[in-house]
Amino acid sequence: MQTAQTLVNSRHTTTCKHSVRRTPATMQQQPVLLARLGPARLLARERNVLCYSSIAGAEKVPMSQFEPHEYLNDRYKAIEDRLKVVRKRLNKPMTLAEKVVYGHLDDPENAEMKRGVSYLRLRPDRVAMQDATAQMAMLQFISSGLPKTMVPSTIHCDHLIEGTTSPQPDREGKFGGEADLSFAVKSNKEVYDFLATAGSKYGVGFWRPGSGIIHQIVLENYALPGLMMIGTDSHTPNAGGLGMCAVGVGGADAVDVMAGLPWELKAPKVIGVKLTGKMSRWTSPKDVILKVAGILTVKGGTGAIVEYFGPGVDHMSCTGMATVCNMGAEIGATTSMFPYNKRMHDYLVATGRAPAASLADSFKEHLKADEGAQYDQLIEINLSELEPHVNGPFTPDLAHPLSKFAEEMRKNGWPTELKAGLIGSCTNSSYEDMARAASVARQALAAGIKAKVPFTISPGSEQIRATIARDGIMDVFDKIGGTVLSNSCGPCIGQWKRTDVPKGEANSIITSFNRNFAARNDGNPATHCFVASPELVTAYAIAGDLTFNPEKDTLVGADGKEIKLEAPHGDELPSRGFDAGANVYQAPPSSLDERGKLSVKVDPASQRLQLLSPFKAWNGDDIKDAAVLIKVKGKCTTDHISMAGPWLKYRGHLDNISNNLLIGAINIENGKPNAVKNVVTGAEGPVPATARDYKARGLPWVVVGDENYGEGSSREHAALEPRHLGGVAIIVKSFARIHETNLKKQGMLPVTFANPADYDKIDPTDTISIVGLKTFAPGVPLKVVGKKKDGSTYEFPVNHTFNDNQISWFKAGSALNAMAAAFKAGKM
């Protein structure tokens, strides 16, 4: 464990706001001290620290304007009561992450709390779902038979809107935001109607298409310091910018929480990032996470919460902190968090939540780390010395300081000519982001320069769109030659109808997004995508050349004179306040009787939606003589396993979307995607078709994979599809956290090589048996027995991370099956 250098030894006298300053007192003296506090309540007394909460008797504060009968006070009281128990048991200074996570324990009296070891059962405060994953989540919730969700929940329509940057025949020759939104509303009507009616029937708030990206909507309306949320999107940690513990999960986890069950999470380790100094010139919060990604890599944060602290934190805006937390998903972190401070207070006030800000002020001793708190790993970054960064291509952890980026471009032979610049998305679409990017664009316009390449802007929400339109920022983007897309994810998740570059042609783009895997944005595996701050992306779009360095290079104005761009600037909050824009929220009926009269219909002939049938329970035997569907070479993200883009339309239809199973994964046997040999027929064919053939023959199959298998998006379709098409196990060197849990939830068997070198023993033509399932138990390895074509065999151990509860999912056939059985038996 490492202790932050700035934290003093906990034996020293300390003072908490809302407490009294004290020197060590005897037991006889303490009642006198407590009597002076009046109505304030003692929270904990360990190691000469007295902290008191002043929320007792405070006026009731709704969790949001849309949930007037759900109170923040009640959540804070519950956290406080749990922490009383936890502090007595741990008897040590706690990190912020521990306070918030352990403050949501289902059973704080008896829960084991060992970082990286224990499985925790937690009680999140809310659930948020984006429309692509909400379809399957709501279909699963409907299958549970429950009449309403047990925690506040919302659905956000942001993933199904395709962005365009050139005239489209299917949009009457139009393109851009309004045309794309109109087209999406018509083409996705069946799905939107399903989500809207399901939300109304089961008490789930519904944010209509055009409302904005889930994470920006959550930050503006629902994120609150110290609370816990799970969301069916990997970038849910965005809410950590407001001090919330927000974790991306699969739909099955969301269903559990909506059904009132505890949510299970392996106790995270805590990585501390100490920030000192102050950012200046072209450096922005985005550069903090780009730097951290370069340090920790795409799997360095796995199983950990990244907790930022130090004096540098106070020099970041709330939305800047959200940017850092958002992209923390790219290092595999469970989530990322910042301590509550004045910048968060100001953002809460600016977004109409002043009472919540005041209550958080009174609760803030629980919203920061204790003095002397220890971290499993400690990173220090001096913001005064931090350079702007550009990361990529093909992976978000390939970090390049701006001063060395041009050299790296040339050395690696990456295309230096820029083909497109894209800003916005859930990572960087705040008012401050847009204002700083516009300040760069204004300088170019003043010199008579426009963007040299297609330049797109994706506002994060209707509130951001309306506000930047009112304040003239949108006009600047229009004049520079930009295309404003709809308030949605768009190109960031592959919803980009790109027409300027043929598929397969090498080219470079730069975005302010969070993820840049091959083919991620435009479906073209030859596109080199780089990631940077919005202001840097804007500068590159104006220059049209990725060897350009705005800190030292010049542009040529319309008059032939050279100009050097000044450092960007922009207000972190609009001086005239936010403009809410159009009404884009649909509240569910408040009456259970009224909701009970509603019906949710799914057409059996629909190609977009399909009611679910339960998976079969475990047959009670070991896995025997399974085929290897594919042995994957190298990186295999959830985009490789279940692509987005045009496949998003089938997210509510399991059988149809299963036709994209592993079509992006590279087969080690031939070096090609979506081409495997059928071990029965000998014919080469697509991965999904081969899996369907094995299923029809009753032949079980497994996948063999490399490191960090399933990194990237939280999409549970990457776990549902292999289960649906007859898969039984995934054998890899290591898993990304969310994907491993998703596989367990669907009754799959995710295991890892005890010795990673055993990956080389398996040939794609081998048959695989997995032995030990009859005595399946936590911590006990299983055994793989492989058989070659010549009849020779080999064996080796494989590890798993199943606990008793998760083993019950496996035996029941899925977590949903286990939940339905418990509900039927009256155990819920």
Image: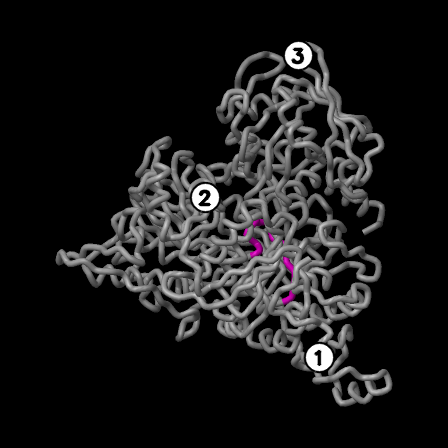
Is residue 607 visible in the rendered image? The answer is no
Q: Which x, y percent locates residue 298? A: 55, 45
Segment tinted magenta in the rendering:
226-237
Please, what is the three-letter code of the amino acid marked with disc 3? Lys
Mark 3 nearby-residue class (10 Å; few <14, some 14–19, many ≥20):
few
Please, what is the three-letter code of the amino acid marked with disc 2? Asn
Mark 2 nearby-residue class (10 Å; few <14, some 14–19, many ≥20):
many
Classify 371 as above or below 563: below
Total residue callouts: 3
- Residue 13's tag is 1
Q: Which residue is mark 3?
A: 789
Classify 196 as above or below 710: below
Q: Earlier in the sequence, mark 3 or mark 1?
A: 1
Please, what is the three-letter code of the amino acid marked with disc 1? Thr
Q: Earlier in the sequence, mark 1 or mark 2?
A: 1
SS at mark 2? loop
Please identify the quarter of the rendering in which residue 470 is found.
Answer: bottom left
Q: Earlier in the sequence, mark 3 or mark 2?
A: 2
Residue under the point 46% across and 61% down: 285
Can you tell which of label 1 and label 2 is closer to the viewer? 1
Query: Does 456 sit left or right of 191 as displayed?
Result: left
Q: Which residue is mark 2?
A: 516
Return the residue found at the far left: 559
Return the residue found at the far top: 790
